[in-house]
Each structure stands twice: as structure tokens, then as C-alpha cells.
Amino acid sequence: MSLSDPIGDMIARIKNAQVRNHKKVALPSSNFKVKIADILKSEGFIKDYKIETENNKPTLSVDLKYYSGNPVISTFERVSKPGRRIFSSADSLPKINGGLGIAIVSTPKGVMTDIEARKQKVGGEIICKVF
């Protein structure tokens, strides 16, 4: 099956799993998704992630995180979509909920949070925002 937006699919699967209070969610793996999962883990939005091989296809297994029974991720939405790419310079990167959330940005120096991109003074494509 061909997906037109694999990152959007990842976001939808994580959101749907959290609504159903699942502990884990499995999704097709790619290097880009692994980088996003790594950022989510380092920022404390998920517990952990693993790359497993199932039927010779890599699968990304994400352990979701809850606090007092509620999901840690309250908002997880795609900003730049395949039909409408959103780019931003380092100066105009958005602050998500007054700095409490993060924006994941794809820059020439790699995938990073908006905070890291501002520190390195590099802009790029705003992939999604997490709060």
C-alpha cells in the first residue's frame, strides 16, 4: 500500500492509540520516522521506541507515555503537508504554547526541535508541532 503522507500516518496512529489508551503502537519504519521518535523520546513525550523486523519489513514500535491516566501528548498535529509545504527561517520559527511545546523542524543540519534550530540559527520545513 502506498501512503501519500507517511508522517501524517505516524501522527494519526499515535493519536488514535492514545485515545484508546494503548501502551504501544506499531507502524512502518523509516529513517525519518525514527528521527522524529528520537526527538519525542528526548523531549519526554514517549517512553521509548524500538525498530523490529517483521516479515523482512522494519517496524517502529513506540511505547506511549501517560501521566495520571492521561496521554502526555495532548496536541500532535502536522504542519507541513505534501500538498502545502511550510518553511520558516530561524528567526520566525513558531513557539508552541509559549515555549511549552515543540515544533519538529527538518533542516539542512538534520531533524531537530525548534529550540535547537534557533540555537544553531538554521531554518527549515516545520514538520509537526507537539504539546
Image (spheres, grey):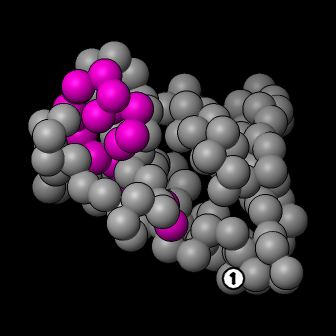
Q: Is residue 117 magenta?
A: yes
- Type of residue at label 1? Val
Residue 28 in the figure: left or right of residue 97? right
Res 97 → quadrant = bottom left
Q: Residue at x 86, y 65 (%)?
A: 23
Q: Is residue 2 magenta?
A: no
Most extreme residue toward the top is: 109
Res 109 → quadrant = top left
Q: Is residue 28 visible?
A: no
Q: Residue at x 57, y 39 (%)?
A: 39
Q: Which residues are magenta?
A: 114-131
Q: Is residue 99 visible?
A: yes
Q: Position of residue 13 (x, y in %)?
A: 61, 65
Residue 2 in the figure: left or right of residue 88? right
Residue 107 in the figure: left or right of residue 28? left
Local packing at callout 1 (Cα closer than 10 Å; few below 14, some 14-19, many 20+) is: few
Residue 47 sits above or below residue 125 on the image: below
Residue 100 sits above or below residue 44 on the image: below
Residue, disc 1: 19
Residue 124 in the figure: left or right of residue 16? left
Q: Residue at x 50, y 73 (%)?
A: 75
Q: Residue at x 80, y 50 (%)?
A: 47
